[in-house]
Image: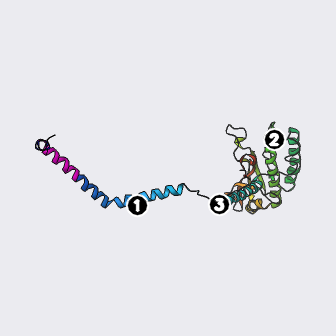
Amino acid sequence: MNLEAYWQENRTFVLRVAGGFVVFLIALAIIDATVGSAVSSQRRLVTAAQTKLNQPSFTSADEQMAREDNRALVELLAELEQRVDFAPREGFRPTDAPVTAGRYLDAVANVREGLLPLARRRGMVLDPTLGLPEQSPTREEELARYLDGLDVVDRLVRLAVELGVERIEKVRIRLDPGLFGREGLGYVERTKIELSASGRSAPLLELTQRLARLPGQPLFVDSAALEASRQRADEARLELVLLAPRVARSAKTPETRP
C-alpha cells in the first residue's frame, strides 16, 4: 500500500481518529487523578471483606458459650412456665384418671355446699351459678377447664368473705375460644373468670391487693377496675377478670442439644 497516497486521501479521517485517542488518554488521566485513589481504596476494602468472610466467624469457645446461654435460657423458661401453668388443688383436676361428668358434678356439688351457706351466714350476696353454665358440659376438655375456673372461684369467694365483701352479683367462667376453634390454642391457654362485686370500697380494694399474695399459687389478674359508686360515697364497684392459664410446654419449650 502507498502510505503517501493513503495519507493524502484520508488525512482528515486519520487526524480525527488520532485526536479522539489523545482526548481519551487525557480523560483517563484526569479520572485517575481525581477518583482513582478512591476506587483503589474501595477495591482494597472489598478484598479485605472477602478475605474476612472466608475465615471462621466464631471459635469453639464462642460456640460453647452459646450452648451454655441456651441451656440457661431453657431452664429459665421451664421455671417461668411452671409458675404460670395453673395448678388446681386436689379435687378439681384428678391426675389418676380422666375428668368425667360424675367427677365434675361431685366437685360442683362440694363447692356449692361449701360456698353458698358460707356466704349466707356472712351476709354476702353471691351469684348462685358460681360462673358455671346452666347445662353441664359433656366433653372432657370442657369439664377440666370449668373445674379450673371453679377452683379459682372457690378461692376468690372465700377470700372475699374473709375480707367482708358485701356483694358478688355476677360470676362467669369463660373458656379460651381456641379450645374448639379452627386455629387451636396458642402457647398459653386462657380460661377467664369474670366477676362483678360491689359494696364498701375498702374490702374490694384489699381483695385486689391480696390476690397475688395467696398461699400456694397466686391468682393471676388479667384486669381490674374499681370505680366509686354514684349513689353512695363509701361504696364502689369492682370489675375483675382472673385467669386460669395452661402452658403448652411440650409443644413450645426448645430443646437443648448435647
Question: At label 2, which amino acid type do we have?
Answer: Leu
Query: Does the stretch in magenta take in 50?
Result: no
How many angstroms separate mark 1 from mark 2 (CA)? 73 Å
Residues at marks 2 and 3 touching, judged by CB atoms closer than 8 Å: no
Of the image marks 3 and 1, the number of the one nearer the N terminus: 1
Is disc 1 placed on a helix, strand or loop?
A: helix
Place of residue 243 in the rendered image (x, y in percent of width and height, measured from the top left): 74, 51
Placement of the N terminus among the 4 image quadrants: top left
> What residue sits right under mark 3 in the picture?
62
> What residue sits right under mark 2 in the picture?
143
Question: At label 3, which amino acid type do we have?
Answer: Asp
Q: Judge the density around disc 3: few (<14), some (14-19), many (≥20) Cα neighbours within 10 Å.
A: few
Residue drawn at point x = 67 percent, y = 39 percent: 183
Question: Which label was assigned to residue 41?
Answer: 1
Q: Quadrant of residue 217?
A: bottom right
Instruction: Please name which of the two marks, 1 or 2, marks the residue nearer to the observer.
Output: 1
Q: Is residue 68 left or right of residue 102?
A: left
Of the image marks 2 and 3, the number of the one nearer the N terminus: 3
How many angstroms separate mark 3 from mark 1 (CA)? 32 Å
Residue 112 in sight here = yes
Which residues, given as a range, are shown in magenta? 9-22
**Closest to the observer, 63 or 37:** 37
Q: Is residue 58 left or right of residue 107?
A: left
Is disc 2 placed on a helix, strand or loop?
A: helix
**Closest to the observer, 57 or 124:** 57
Query: Does the stretch in magenta take in 20?
Result: yes
Question: Which label was assigned to residue 3?
Answer: none
Q: Quadrant of residue 25?
A: bottom left
